[in-house]
Image (cartoon, rainbow, N blue to C red):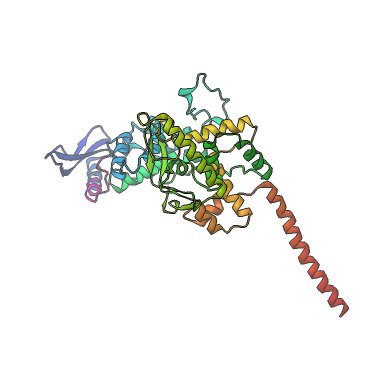
Amino acid sequence: MPAKVAQISATTWRLTVSDGYDQLGKQVLHRKVVEATSKRQADKFWTLYAAEIANGKKASSGKMTLSQFYAYWKKNNFDEERQKTTLSHYDFLFRRIETALGGLRLDKIEPRHILDFKANLEKAGIKNDPNAGRRKKPKVNTPGDQDKLSGNTVKKHLTLLDNMFHSAVKWNMANTNPCKNITMPKVDAKKPDIYDRDTLGLFLYHLQSEPIKYQVMVYLALAGSLRREEIFGLRTPDDIDLKGCTVSIVEANVYIPGEIVIKPPKNKSSARPVSLPPSTMALIEAYQGIRNDHKANVGDDDWTESGKLFTQWNGTPAHPHSFNTWIKKFLVKHDLPHITPHTLRHMTGTYLSLAGTDPATIAAKMGHAKITTTLGTYVHAVPAAEKETAKTIDTYLQGALNDAEKKAKKRAIN
């Protein structure tokens, strides 16, 4: 074994501590360079260092780079088949992390590195155009807020790092978590614009001229509060009860780069029966008929039966993003305010709330595990309805005042 304490320069010493042997019989050595004014002081440092290792406080894999640890962390944290969508999201986030920190050793990453990375994420110009590869001409952005990452996106990057280092410390592969005391960016909850009654009427009026496929998608989201992935996960006829006017949420179709993944609904509460108006069920029945006619025209040789309600021309599952693509074009065509398929779901909760439906019933319809999610995230104020609150509170205040005045007059008379 090398010397426990070896002098490098007048004030620099190398400490070497043995930590047994590995599976191949090779001695495991830990080394550390310290500054000391004498060998006696260096010996004291060695004793402390040896105690750290003996007590399990010294990381055993500090030489692993962050990129290497990321692969190790995924392998030991996730069942790849069950967590494909989560891993795909983490891989997307780790691209920027790898560029900035991936080559650094796990035991060399300090809070300053995390702070520098955070500052870089918050700069203008860091945001990439996700559709750059498909554009004939590059998209031109004026540097500013529009090409900055949102506070939520910055937070997701930092949260991934924090989770990784938390595991590294727990597994004795890092001494400390450099993200522990980093202040997360402030994230302002964005509430989508909800159509008022007049705008909703125009939207539904123009929708009547669209292909029935998209009409069904809209009403499943708007009348049924289904998530986009739940809509594309519907199976026919298994999940559709035309007589009972319900659809059952059993599966969700989620897109990750390169494939469409079939997975269980978002949570236990999301697996649910959803009641729909007879008018919506009539649309679904009409669409099923058109779809069956199309299937017969394609023929068995070219048709791949996926069992899904929404398919491509050959029967394979339709792409969930096709709903977004259609609605963008539809809104531009009719000069309507921006919404997304998920906004339709927000509208469901809002309109039901305005109609006086109790929060527990709304939560059950939307598949929320907690009522607080329904109240805090999906039930928003429609401007016209908010104005009505002024009349309501004025009526209440004036009523209280009138009652008091009547009682005062009675007391004066008596």
Quadrant of the drawing holding the C terminus: bottom right
Identify the residue at the far left of this view.
25
Q: Position of residue 213 (x, y in %)?
A: 52, 37
Task: Report the side of 242 relative to 16 (left or right).
Answer: right
At x 27% / y 43%, what residue is drawn?
Answer: 59
In the image shown, does 351 or 295 lie closer to the viewer?
Answer: 295
Task: Report the side of 366 relative to 2 (left or right).
Answer: right
Q: Position of residue 325 (x, y in %)?
A: 52, 32
Identify the residue at the far bottom of this view.
414
> Does the magenta run of residues contain 53?
yes
Q: Position of residue 191 (x, y in %)?
A: 58, 44
In the image shown, does 328 or 209 lie closer to the viewer?
Answer: 209
Q: Does residue 17 sit above or below 355 in this rendering?
A: above
Q: Position of residue 246 (x, y in %)?
A: 49, 51
Task: Report the side of 409 relative to 26 (left or right).
Answer: right
Q: Is residue 118 visible?
A: no
The stretch of residues the image draws in magenta is 48-61
Quadrant of the drawing holding the N terminus: top left
Q: Does residue 231 sit above or below 259 in this rendering?
A: below
Q: How many numbered dots are placed on residues in this image?
A: 0
Q: Image quadrant of residue 95?
A: top left
At x 37% / y 29%, what residue is drawn?
Answer: 302
At x 59% / y 46%, what residue is drawn?
Answer: 347
> Does the magenta run of residues contain 355?
no
In the image shown, does 96 or 10 lie closer to the viewer?
Answer: 96
In the image shown, does 83 or 263 lie closer to the viewer?
Answer: 263
Q: Is residue 289 visible?
A: yes
